[in-house]
Each structure stands twice: as C-alpha cells, then as structure tokens.
Amino acid sequence: MAEYILSATSTADLTKEQFEERDIRVVFFHYTIDGEEKIDDLGQSISFHDFYQMMEQGAMTKTSQLSIGEYMDYFRGMLTEGKDILHVTLSSGLSGDYNSARSASEMLKEEFPERKIYVVDSLGASTGYGLLMDKLAEKRKEGLSLEELRDYAEEHKLELNHWFFSTDLKYYVRGGRISKASGFFGTMLRICPLLNMNDQGKLIPREKIRTVKKVEAALVEKMVENAIDGLDYSDKVFISMSDCPDYANAVKEMVEAKFPKLNGKVVINSIGTTIGSHTGPGTVALFFWGKKRGA
C-alpha cells in the first residue's frame, strides 16, 4: 500500500462504510436547516429521508464550504502522522472548496517543508465525485505513487460523466446553482429537465423532457451514447438520488439490462445534505466513465 493519504470531502456522497473500505479520509462540509447549523456527516445525525421531508415541508437550507482554517487543521492532523496527502475537492464550478484547500496547503508548506500536499479539483459532485475517488483508491492499491495518482486524476477526471434529472428545479434556482432563465421550464407541467455537468464542473440544463418515465429512459440513453465501449461498458456505475428510490431503481434496472458487462451491480447512494440543499428531493443522477465532457 502506498504511503500517502487519499482524501475527499463529504460532498462525494459515499457512505461512511464506503469511505472506510477504500481507506479514504473525509472532511465534512456544514449546512444550516431553518437556521440550525449541522455537519454534513453522511447521514449519521439526521437521516436523508428526514432531511428531504423537512425541505418538502418548506425548511430553508444553506450550505457553507470549509474555511481555510478548518482545512489547515484537517491537513495538519494528517501531516503530523508523517504522511503526504492527495486531497480531491468538490467542483470549483459549484463551490470555493478548491481555493480554500489550495490556500491551506500553501500556508502549511513552511510548517511542514518535508511533506507534500497535492489538491485536485474534481470538477465533479455527489457520487460522480465519489466514483472518481473509488477509481483513485483502486489505482493507489495498484501501486501508483502520489504524483502518478495526482496526474491520473487530472488526466481522467473529465471522463467521469455526470447526467441527471430533476422533477423540480426550484431548489437549484433558489440555491443559485442554475439561473432563473434556465430553470423556468422546470415549473411547467410535468417537465423533467435533463442536465449534465460540463468541463468547468457547472450544471447545465440540456433537454426538456415530459414525464419521469421518458426522462429516466433519456438518462440511460445518454450513457449508451457516451460510455466507454458503448454497450460493452465494463466499469462501475454509481447513481445518487434525493429521496426518490423508485426513480433511482428504475434507472438502475434499465442500466443493468442494457449493459451486461458492468463491473458489479449499479450502486445507489443518497445525495447528501450539502448537495441535497441545492437539489431538493426528486433528483436522480447517473455517473459512469465515458467521453470527455465538453462545454
């Protein structure tokens, strides 16, 4: 096992067990719900179902990224173990997380001149970011050095495709993650917008599709069009969803039927409280390795 630490934030939306199994350290974002500050602790202190129920009932949420000081404390704890660090952040297209982590790493150079901290912008979110972390953990196990793993992440991160749909865009608009102009069609009767994440790690509405069944099929069709090796795709697939397991399971079943060579079953995780504060309930996201993302 390589002697360095692989690290991410809670916004990769892996479970506590998944982080531990892959030996990935995790640092937690914060959020407030109806004015009460909480930690995005992977669903430990509040269940994801309860969180989304509160949002549906009108609770207001707000998220806050990690401060430079928090990052310094987090990194310092690992550096004092005598280990170097590869830390991967939430997309800079959604958050200032990358800048905070970079600033903290620079400020610690004087204190730990013999240690290395590399910070990579995932340009991803939720279990898309989580699927990137999963791959990096595999590559570390294969024996890649710290620098080799950093270079691998930079070279391949845009091959991690993020496609998703929402049954209600009001939360995305409210959180400023997409514009009101982009969001208008989400309020139209039974329109379920299909979105993806572009090469700058920003959320882009791509198509307006009427009814959930049709948008579920369209989501899977994007994988057919974009996945490495098409229908012969043989890597992993992750799905994340915000309190809509029926929609997520329908997508999972279609993917498993169309792609018989998958590496294991499709994994479904909940969208965590940080990302979920901006999606609200009713989002399903599909993540797979494919063509490099464009604008």
Image: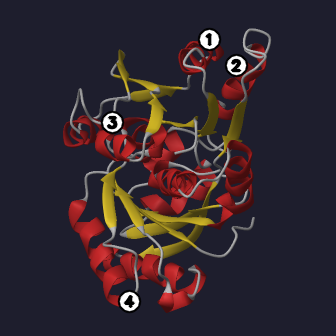
The alpha-carbon separation of the residues under discs 3 and 1 comes to: 22 Å
For this rendering, which residue is in front, 171 or 70?
70
In the rendered structure, are the residues bearing label 3 and label 4 in contact, judged by CB atoms less than 8 Å apart? no
Residue 291 percent location from the top left of the image: 66, 76
**Residue 104 drawn above or below residue 274:** above
Q: Are marks 2 and 1 in contact (CB under 8 Å)?
A: yes
| Residue at disc 2, secondary structure | helix
Q: What is the spatial separation of the Cα atoms under label 2 and label 1, in whole angstroms?
A: 7 Å
The residue indicated by pointer 2 is 104
Q: Mark 1: which secondary structure?
A: helix
Circle 3 is placed at which residue position? Answer: 42
- Amino acid bearing label 2: Ala
Q: Residue at x 44, y 27 (%)?
A: 28
Query: Above or below — where is 32 with respect to 22?
Result: above
Position of residue 233 measured from the top left corner of the image (x, y, whole percent)? 50, 83
Q: CA distance from mark 4 to mark 1?
A: 47 Å
Q: Is residue 217 above or below residue 36?
A: below
Q: Give whichever of discs 2 and 1 has the lower sequence position.
A: 1
Circle 4 residues within 10 Å: few <14, some 14–19, many ≥20: some
How far is mark 3 from mark 2, CA to CA? 24 Å
Q: Which residue is mark 1?
A: 69
Amino acid residing under circle 1: Gly
